[in-house]
């Protein structure tokens, strides 16, 4: 386990603190943590201690011991590989700040594409279902950008608790269900969205980077990565209104198999969308009725 390179000195300014933190971890990570824990501006990070750079002859933003201690703990956690989102318990998604804990996945840019696709086909007043909501980023972002009725499900009570906290934090009202996919769902929906666990159990990425710290049951189905996608896609027609859409996120190596599952379930106008990294990531299909 990597340790701090030196005992944290007493700081006179944010700039001092930033310089020290850059010596311990990646510069971008250092800036992120200093901004978070010291509640300062980007300008404060780079002001030197030279008299000609002082503000009215005084050093900007002195750092108190409580702030310094919290930052030191955060730096130590980051040196051990812990994701920034779990350290700060926060992550931006679609320009909204969400609470994130180790009980839920860290929101990713790829999932913003899922929201974008849903908003492109959604209409005000429609009923939308988010399966496996986790922290609620998909459901709450849809609710925050469209006048609609949103139902969100998750089989994990701890994940639902985080989603509920985000509901309160963002002052957005959605319906939460403790449900194994469609188990507790009632009625039909105009749009169903889902970002289910789709990483194969033997994928080496599960033991790398941030994924080492994230809940494994939210990443992998313990099988080939298509187990939950099969369930969602096969059962969705039973819960969709005529001319309703199913939109799912999948792995970069799964687009053809997922399109085949959509076709087998009777969907029409099946299409795929490419994420910001150039990978096919989203499949959508139209349900035209029984």
Image (cartoon, grey):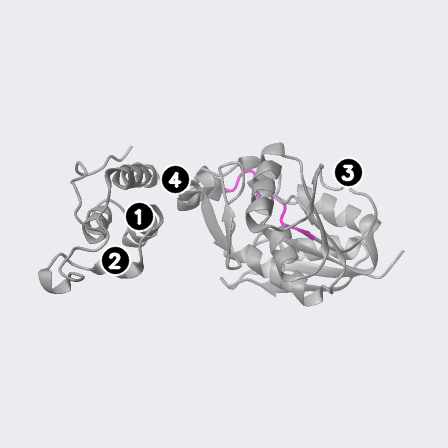
Asked if residue 93 lies left or right of residue 50, the reply is right
Question: Residue 164, image x and y in percent?
Answer: 61, 41
Which one is closest to the eye, mark 2 or mark 3? 2
Task: Identify the element where label 3 is drawn.
Answer: loop
Up-down: is 67 above or below 97? above
Mark 1 vs mark 3: which is more N-terminal?
Answer: 1
Asked if residue 45 lies left or right of residue 9, the reply is right
Which is nearer the eye, 164 or 248?
Answer: 164
The residue positioned farthest toward the left in the image shown: 51
In which quadrant is the C terminus drawn?
bottom right
The residue positioned farthest toward the right in the image shown: 290
Name the residue tied to disc 2. Answer: 44
Mark 4 vs mark 2: which is more N-terminal?
Answer: 2
Which one is closest to the eye, mark 4 or mark 1? 1
Checking the image for residue 38, the label placed there is 1
Residue segment shown in magenta: 193-203
Name the residue tied to disc 4. Answer: 82
Up-down: is 217 above or below 97? above
Residue drawn at x 48%, y 54% as measured from the top left: 92
Mark 2 vs mark 3: which is more N-terminal?
Answer: 2
Mark 1 vs mark 2: which is more N-terminal?
Answer: 1
Inter-mark Cα distance, 1 to 2: 10 Å
Question: Residue 32, image x and y in percent?
Answer: 34, 52
Inter-mark Cα distance, 4 to 1: 20 Å
Marks 2/3 in contact by CB < 8 Å: the verdict is no
Up-down: is 13 above or below 208? below
């Amino acid at each position: 386990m990597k340790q701090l390179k030196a005992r944290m000195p007493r700081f006179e300014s944010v700039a001092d603190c930033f310089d020290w933190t850059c010596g311990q971890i990646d510069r971008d990570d250092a800036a992120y943590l200093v901004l978070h824990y010291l509640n300062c501006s980007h300008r404060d990070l780079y002001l030197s201690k030279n008299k000609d750079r002082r503000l009215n002859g005084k050093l900007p933003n002195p750092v108190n011991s409580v702030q310094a201690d919290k930052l030191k703990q955060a730096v130590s956690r980051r040196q051990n590989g812990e994701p920034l989102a779990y350290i700060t318990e926060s992550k931006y998604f679609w320009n909204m700040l969400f609470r994130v804990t180790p009980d839920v996945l860290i929101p990713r840019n790829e999932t913003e594409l899922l929201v974008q696709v849903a908003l492109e086909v959604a209409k005000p007043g429609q009923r939308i279902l988010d399966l496996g909501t986790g922290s609620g980023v998909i459901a709450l972002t849809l609710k925050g950008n469209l006048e609609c009725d949103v139902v969100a499900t998750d089989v994990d009570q701890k994940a639902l608790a985080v989603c509920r906290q985000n509901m309160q934090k963002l002052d957005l009202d959605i319906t939460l269900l403790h449900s194994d996919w469609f188990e507790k769902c009632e009625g039909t929906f105009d749009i169903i969205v889902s970002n289910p666990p789709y990483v194969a159990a033997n994928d080496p990425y599960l033991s790398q980077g941030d994924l080492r710290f994230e809940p494994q049951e939210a990443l992998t189905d313990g099988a080939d990565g298509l187990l939950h996608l099969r369930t969602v896609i096969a059962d969705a027609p039973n819960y969709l209104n005529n001319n309703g859409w199913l939109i799912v996120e999948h792995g970069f190596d799964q687009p053809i198999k997922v399109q085949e599952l959509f076709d087998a379930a009777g969907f029409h106008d099946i299409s795929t969308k490419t994420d910001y990294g150039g990978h096919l990531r989203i499949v959508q299909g139209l349900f035209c009725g029984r």
